[in-house]
Image (tube, rainbow, N blue to C red):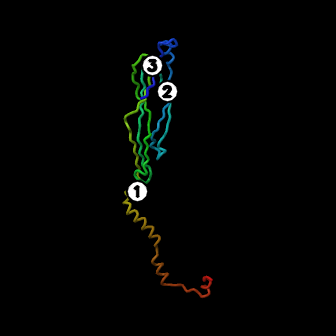
Amino acid sequence: MIELTLKKCRGEDYCASEDEIANYFRGKYFGFLTNSIRFDSTKWGEESIVKESSLAWIPISTQAQTEIPFKVTRSLLSLKDLFFDLEDITTFESSGLFRLVQSPNKPFEYNEEDIQSISVQLSIDLAMIEREIITTLDVLSDIGGLESTLVLLFGAILSVINHNALRNYMIAHLYQAAVPKGRLSKFKRT
């Protein structure tokens, strides 16, 4: 856990009075810059991991001592986004997703010189994000199975290739064209 505490100066000659300290911090803010890596469900593959930075302005409370807690939440990501599925080979996994979430303010009553505290702690929860899409093999199996689809596909291809093949073979071997003798000599090699 990380804790940042704003304390009053006390017991030294250079310290200001309680009223001067309260007047100085009244209307002031902490600038709290945070980074996060999150999952965007509208994108696919590595593009679905979005890195962000944000700036939170936290007002300094001069009326009561408060603690502003933040929790770091972590997530594990497992995406099967390709149109073919080969289990672990085509699965995109990432364990580096995290986000800083502000919790409700809590009263903070430890020392009189403390004005305000900001704490950052790791959440014990771990979210699992998984996404699977319908692959090409899934579509083929829903239609009627991969085997029957392949049989139909190859049957259609072979029927185009073998169209009139038997008739052409029979005609070529039953009937031969007569070639005049003068024309045949043009094709001989010397």
Judging by the rendered image, the residue that carries numbered circle 2 is: 57
**Secondary structure at numbered mark 3:** strand
Residues marked 1 and 2 touching at CB (< 8 Å): no
Residues marked 3 and 1 touching at CB (< 8 Å): no
User: Which of 39 and 2 lies nearest the eye of the viewer?
Assistant: 2
Judging by the rendered image, the residue that carries numbered circle 1 is: 137
Identify which residue is drawn at 50% across, 84% down. Answer: 175
Give the amino acid type for the residue marked by disc 3 in the picture. Answer: Ile
Measured in 3D between alpha carbons, the distance from the residue under mark 3 to the one under mark 1, in whole angstroms, is: 63 Å
Q: Where is residue 167 drawn, in percent x and y?
A: 46, 78
- Considering the image in quadrants, where does the N terminus appear? top left
Q: Which of marks 3 and 2 is in front?
A: 3
Measured in 3D between alpha carbons, the distance from the residue under mark 1 to the one under mark 2, in whole angstroms, is: 51 Å
Judging by the rendered image, the residue that carries numbered circle 3 is: 115
Give the amino acid type for the residue marked by disc 2 in the picture. Answer: Trp
Q: Where is residue 3 drawn, in percent x and y?
A: 43, 26
